[in-house]
Every structure is written in C-alpha cells, then in structure tokens.
Image: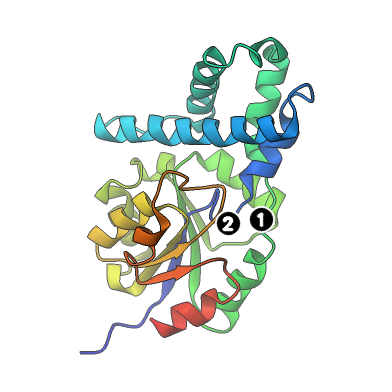
C-alpha cells in the first residue's frame, strides 16, 4: 500500500533551523576566551535540555524559557568559579536576551521556500519554548512559517505525545501526512511514536551526547544539512 501524501512539515526551531551558538558566544563576557566560551555555551544548552527532560518526567506544565535559561545559567556559574565574577545582573540579562536573536543556518531559508513552492507544503514551527521567543526568532532569522507552535501554546513539552497530537489537531492533519524535521533525536523519537514521518538534520551544536551511528539508522531520513530537504521529503 502506498504512503499517504505528505501535506505539511513541522520544524524544530533552535539548533535545527537556527545557529543559537554564535549568538550566545557573542553575548558572553569578552574576558572569557572564545574556545572556553564555546564550551560554556554548549554545556549551558545541554543543561537546559536536561532541565526540560526533568520537567517532562515530572509532568510539569511548560515554563517560560527565559526562566529555565536563567536557572540553568545560575547552576552552571555555580560550577564555574573562574567565570562567575564576569556575570553581573546586566550581563546575565543580556546573555539570556541573546537567545531571542539568532541567525538561521545558511541553507534553511532556501529549503523552506523549496518545500512551499516546489512541493506545495505548509510549514510550521513546532518547538519547545515560548511564543514570544518564536516571534523574536522569526524576525531575527528572516524565516517565514505558516504558524508558530510553542510548547507554551500547546500546553506540553515535546516529546510528550500530546505536544504532537495537539499540533496535528490544530492543523487538521493525520500523523502520516506530516514530517517532523529536527536536530534532536529525543524529539523525533517522540514524533515517531505518534506516527509522524521523521527527518534528522545533523548539527554540530546539538545532540552532543547522542551516538550518531545509531541515530543514522533510527529515522526515515538522516541529513548533514537541509540542502536537499525538499528532495528527501519528496522521496518519502
């Protein structure tokens, strides 16, 4: 039996479409050497994901991402006595604000246009975080979507099934008619369980704890970037 026609793409946003790392490293105090700043940013992002996982396991309602980022930053600074003196209140606020202004990875804009124009698909952001964050990020990145679905709006964090189910319900599509594109294996695993098609995009900034050799065989498609995303989805 042939697969149903794909009608829409859900995109994870930060990491998948956007280079969060450059924005955050640039906002960190200049007293921190660039290679250390990079490691600091990667660990902060990792701690943020661990905090979200904890909230998911405890079935807690989505929290404003700025609050989660502030809490994980404080915890990280507690483990980084050399860096802590560089973070006064103003610096802390500035660095949390840096998450609200990110550029897209270079090929993403063209990939999204191709999905719309060549394949006639609807495209949506479907990501953990707040609606304000997503509005700010579409402006800073210049990316255009048909709608933005945040965990705040959906009332559930990914990878909880209700996050995907609520998104599908709102766009009135069946799971097999939608592809999730993400740079996070946990997210795609959640989507897969709900019946969505899955495309993994490998980004060096994300999934640093995952074994990529395992990830390569888990999903419908594995890509190193979005250059031929339309071709990959057409193939599904």
User: Can you identify the residue that label 2 sits on?
Assistant: 17
In the displayed structure, would residue 189 be above or below residue 131?
Answer: below
Residue found 66% across the figure and 55% down from its top: 104
127 or 19: nearer the viewer:
19
Residue found 53% across the figure and 63% down from its top: 146
CB within 8 Å, label 1 to label 2 = yes
User: Can you identify the residue that label 1 sits on?
Assistant: 104
Say which quadrant the N terminus sits in.
Answer: bottom left
In the displayed structure, would residue 68 be above or below residue 214?
Answer: above
Quarter where residue 220 is shown: bottom left
In the displayed structure, would residue 115 be above or below residue 165?
Answer: below
Disc 1 residue crowd, few under 14, some 14–19, many 20+, Cα 10 Å: many
Residue found 30% across the figure and 35% down from its top: 56
Q: Position of residue 210 (x, y in %)?
A: 40, 49
Left or right of residue 77, residue 89 in this image: right
Q: Position of residue 167 (x, y in %)?
A: 36, 56
């Amino acid at each position: 039996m042939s697969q149903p026609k794909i009608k829409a793409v859900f995109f994870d946003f930060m990491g998948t479409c956007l280079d969060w790392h450059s924005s955050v490293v640039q906002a960190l105090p200049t007293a921190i050497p660039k290679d250390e700043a990079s490691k600091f940013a990667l660990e902060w992002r990792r701690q943020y994901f661990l905090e979200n996982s904890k909230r998911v396991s405890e079935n807690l309602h989505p929290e404003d991402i700025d609050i989660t980022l502030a809490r994980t930053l404080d915890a990280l600074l507690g483990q980084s006595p050399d860096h802590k003196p560089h973070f006064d209140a103003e610096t802390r606020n500035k660095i949390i604000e840096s998450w609200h202004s990110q550029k897209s990875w270079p090929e993403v804009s063209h990939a999204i246009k191709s999905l719309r124009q060549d394949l006639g698909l609807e495209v949506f952001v479907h990501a953990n975080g707040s609606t304000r964050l997503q509005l700010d990020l579409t402006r800073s990145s210049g990316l255009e979507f048909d709608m933005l679905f945040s965990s705040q709006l959906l009332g559930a964090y990914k990878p909880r099934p209700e996050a995907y189910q609520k998104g599908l319900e709102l766009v009135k599509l069946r799971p097999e008619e939608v592809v999730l594109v993400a740079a996070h294996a946990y997210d795609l695993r959640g989507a897969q369980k709900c019946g969505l098609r899955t495309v993994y995009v490998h980004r060096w900034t994300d999934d640093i704890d995952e074994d990529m050799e395992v990830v390569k065989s888990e999903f419908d498609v594995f890509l190193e970037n979005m250059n031929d995303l339309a071709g990959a989805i057409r193939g599904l």
